[in-house]
Amino acid sequence: MMFPFVRGERMGYKIIDVLLPILIHFLALQCTALFGGMDAAFRTMLASLLTMPLFYAWYREDERLWSRNTKKITWYAALLTVAAAAALNLLFSSILSALAAEYGISNQTQEELLSGRMVFQILGMGLIVPVTEELVFRGLVYRRLERYLPGATAVLLGAALFAAYHGNLLQVLFAFPMGIVLILLYRHYGTLKMPILFHAASNLTAILLGAGI
């Protein structure tokens, strides 16, 4: 059972309930960042691997306490999701690249992640990180927000927290609309499978673009 006090009705408890998964993931990233000689993509992958079991256990507990209806995922819906993820990544990346060139805005965080070894980019950013981030931001954070807030408010705040967590202006502008799409997928299908698929396809598109493929 997760910390019992965060199930109370007081506002402070609700805030802890929502933000605790983000804080733990952030601390894990900071701990791996202490190893400065490591590849940035590897450090991010390592933080995701270390925290994934805990987040999955919390997610399963929330699933037990607050179940939701799920919809069947067809092969063509999955294919459409992958195509939409790639297309939106290309669209937003083009817009943000133009903004960066026009106003000289740095995108250092993504550049560091996409400059590492390809194996860590694909395994970490393309596969492992999407699973952990979806557990955190859709499976835990958004799922808890929708218990406390009206529907649209929960969606917007959930996307805003996801965007702000990226900590870079260009990444925030990119992650906010993507966060809304990910939440809508989760709401529609009632499972993290489609958000994970969308997230992974988007990240892999960025990796391939960064590699010039």
Image (cartoon, rainbow, N blue to C red):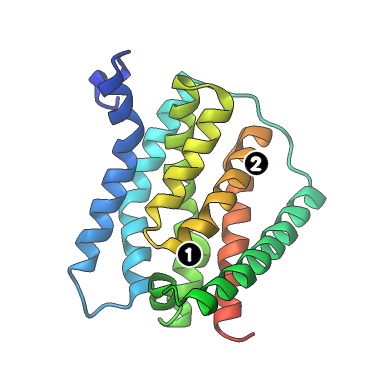
Q: Amino acid at mark 1?
A: Leu
Instruction: Tell me which residue sits at (19%, 72%) in the image.
Output: 35
Asked whether 27 or 46 is in front, the reply is 27
The answer to whether residue 76 is above or below residue 111 is above
Q: Name the outermost residue toward the bottom.
A: 212
The quarter of the image holding the N terminus is top left
* Residue annotated with mark 2: 185
Asked whether 122 or 7 is in front, the reply is 7
The quarter of the image holding the C terminus is bottom right
Mark 1 or mark 2: whose residue is earlier in sequence = 1
Instruction: Tell me which residue sits at (27%, 22%) in the image.
Output: 13
Q: Is residue 18 left or right of residue 27?
A: right
- Picture coordinates of residue 202, whole percent (x, y): 60, 62
Asked whether 79 or 108 is in front, the reply is 108
Mark 2 is surrounded, within 10 Å at the Cα level, by few (under 14), some (14 to 19) or many (20 or more) other residues, namely many
Instruction: Tell me which residue sits at (63%, 33%) in the image.
Output: 187
Residue 193 visible in the displayed image: no
The answer to whether residue 74 is above or below residue 4 is below
Q: Name the outermost residue toward the front.
A: 103
The answer to whether residue 4 is above or below residue 106 is above
* Residue annotated with mark 1: 170
Q: Amino acid at mark 2?
A: Leu
- Picture coordinates of residue 198, whole percent (x, y): 63, 54
- Picture coordinates of residue 147, whole percent (x, y): 47, 21
Count up the numbered dots: 2
The answer to whether residue 208 is above or below residue 7 is below
Q: Is residue 81 left or right of residue 67?
A: right
Which quarter of the picture shows residue 3? top left
Which quarter of the picture shows residue 191? top right
